Image (cartoon, rainbow, N blue to C red):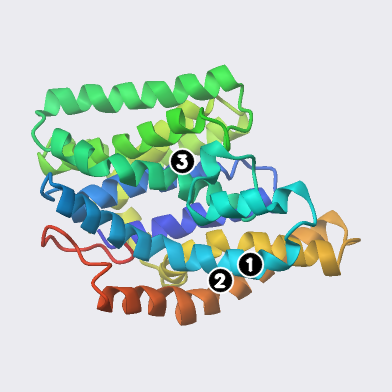
Amino acid sequence: MKALTPLRGLAALAVLAWHADLPVRGYLGVDLFFLLSGFVMTHAYGAMAASAAAWLAFLKARLARIYPVHLLVLFLLLPELGTSPAFSPGGLVSSLVLLQSPWHAMCWNFPSWSISAEWHAYLVFPALAAGLRTKPAGVLLRILAGCLMVVGLTGWLNHGGDITNTPIVLLRCLPEFIAGMALYRLRTLGRIPAWGQSDAAFAAAVAALVGLELVKAPEGFSVCALAVLLICAARDGSAFARALGWPPLAWLGEVSYSLYMAQMPVLVALASFAPHLGAWRHSMLFCAGSLALAAPMSRWFEFPARAWLRGLGLARATNGEPRLKGA
């Protein structure tokens, strides 16, 4: 399933486009992140023991994965302390303990709201994994359908408004995470039909995403199409998976987490040093600056920090299964 890393890169690129004020709903890339995360976590840790020791080992591993870059970005933003309510001491404390979403107003590294929401998913993952791995395919299908319905209903009730730092976010992100878990279990049981993983299914999902974006259809439909993309990308040898293996896309997947997290420092820098740029120049500089910061951040900090923590025993798999790169 090597194509899942480049797929994560495309999701990060979509979020970058959204933050660059391009006329697309690039925030749907975050929905893909949560589907991917549930899928990958189940691949890497789905057989973990249902014990306190395994739960603690899992949380240590996930903290080693997400926290170094999160902490680095907060350090880069420290000069903003007290300059506005968004950079309050209370918000900094909430961010440091990964509770800024949904328990605090948007603050500090704004994109990190999703890291906080994902941390909530990690807290309950061991119990979810233990429950799902014994469920038959029929139950898993009902769980998948229920999760996608909750996501669609949440988007419809909220009328597409911002939910990133409200309790509603857990009604969107947690069901997507669970949906990703259910998809992986169904795939493992061989219950995903061949046509559902085919290149034709991929083409149909892409066409659906484009069409849904053009008419600005309810986001729940787009999340369903993203789930199909995920399943298609997980099938090694498909035309879609081969296309995702293109070296620039593979590189984008490698730096995707740093790219996602580096965007706020670039926005702050542009606001401080180039406040009067036109919209187009601002968007171009923002995208270029984010990529330029993400590349060294990923190579010289994210991966070395993770390797160092792994050496301390904080980032080991808990069930002996093969690990996806970047998991």
Return the residue at label 1: 290
Q: Which residue is mark 3?
A: 31
Residue 201 to residue 241: above or below: above
Query: Where is the C terminus found, in terms of image quarters?
Result: bottom left
Residue 303 position within the rendered picture, expressed as x and y whole percent measured from the top left:
40, 75
- Amino acid type of the residue tagged 3 in the rendering: Asp
Secondary structure under tag 2 reads: helix
Q: How many numbered marks have been drawn onto this rendered protein structure?
A: 3
Mark 2 to mark 1 CA distance (whole Å): 6 Å
Numbered badge on residue 41: none
Dot 1: element: helix
The residue pinned by badge 2 equals: 294
**Left or right of residue 241: residue 142:** left
Up-down relation of residue 56 to residue 230 (above or below): below
Dot 1 and dot 3 residues touching (CB under 8 Å)? no
Q: Marks 2 and 3: CB-CB under 8 Å? A: no
Which one is in front, 288 or 203? 288
Q: Nearer the viewer, residue 285 or 211?
A: 285
The percent position of residue 313, horizontal first and vertical second, equals 23, 72
Mark 2 or mark 3, earlier in chain:
3
- The answer to whether residue 214 is seen in the rendering is yes
Question: Where on the picture, by quarter, is residue 20?
Answer: bottom right
Q: Is residue 289 above or below residue 193?
A: below
Q: Quarter of the image containing the N terminus?
A: bottom left
Per the model, the C-alpha gap separating discs 2 and 3 is 21 Å
Residue drawn 26% across and 79% down? 311
Which residue is at 31% across, 34% downward?
179
